Amino acid sequence: MGKADAVHSYLCPQENTVIIQPEDEITHAGTASTGTKTMKPARGIVLAVGTPKALGKGGRHAMDVKLGDLVIYTKGKGKEVKVDNDEYLLLDRDEILAVAD
């Protein structure tokens, strides 16, 4: 089971929420490595995306991040959660500053 599948079996992000795995939990090979800092801590991989934010008159704001995106966020934002010894971060979409290429 992949990381995204494992997250979905425990956590389902709600409106305008994104679940990421901070890069300090990811090695250069892309595998989880608890407690190993190998990259900048204010970046992470999107593992799950909630529904877009509701707007007036029944519309929804577009969710412009997707599963697998590498995102940059302000360190200290969001809520940290731990599932089976893996750490994840729940962020509002508005707390993501950029999507890296």
Image (spheres, grey):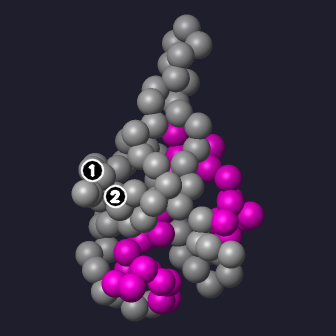
Labels 1 and 2 touching (C-beta < 8 A): yes
If you read the primary sequence from the N terminus, does the residue marked by circle 1 or circle 2 appear first?
A: 2
User: Which structural element holds mark 1?
Assistant: strand
Quadrant where the image shows the C terminus? bottom left
Q: Which mark is residue 52?
A: none
Question: At x 52% / y 39%, what residue is drawn?
Answer: 16
Q: Say if 101 sits above or below 24 in the image.
A: above
Q: Amino acid at mark 1?
A: Ala
Question: At x 74% / y 64%, what residue is drawn?
Answer: 9
User: Which structural element holds mark 2?
Assistant: strand
Quadrant where the image shows the N terminus? bottom right
Q: Which mark is residue 71?
A: 2
Is residue 29 rendered magenta in the image? Answer: yes
Q: From the top left corner, tell me how far across and down residue 24 is, in percent.
A: 38, 80
| Lateral position of residue 78 relative to residue 43, left or right | right
Q: Say if 27 sits above or below 54 in the image.
A: below
Give the image quarter of residue 76. bottom left
Q: Residue furthest top?
A: 57
Q: From the top left corner, tell me how far across and down residue 26 is, in percent.
A: 42, 81
**Which of 8 and 24 lies nearest the eye of the viewer?**
8
Is residue 7 rendered magenta in the image? Answer: yes
Q: From the top left corner, tell me how far across and down residue 22 is, in percent.
A: 42, 71
Q: Which residues are magenta?
A: 5-34
Q: Amino acid at mark 2?
A: Val
Give the image quarter of residue 44. bottom left
Which residue is disc 1 drawn over? 98
Counting every numbered tag in the picture gives 2
Cα distance, mark 1 to mark 2? 6 Å
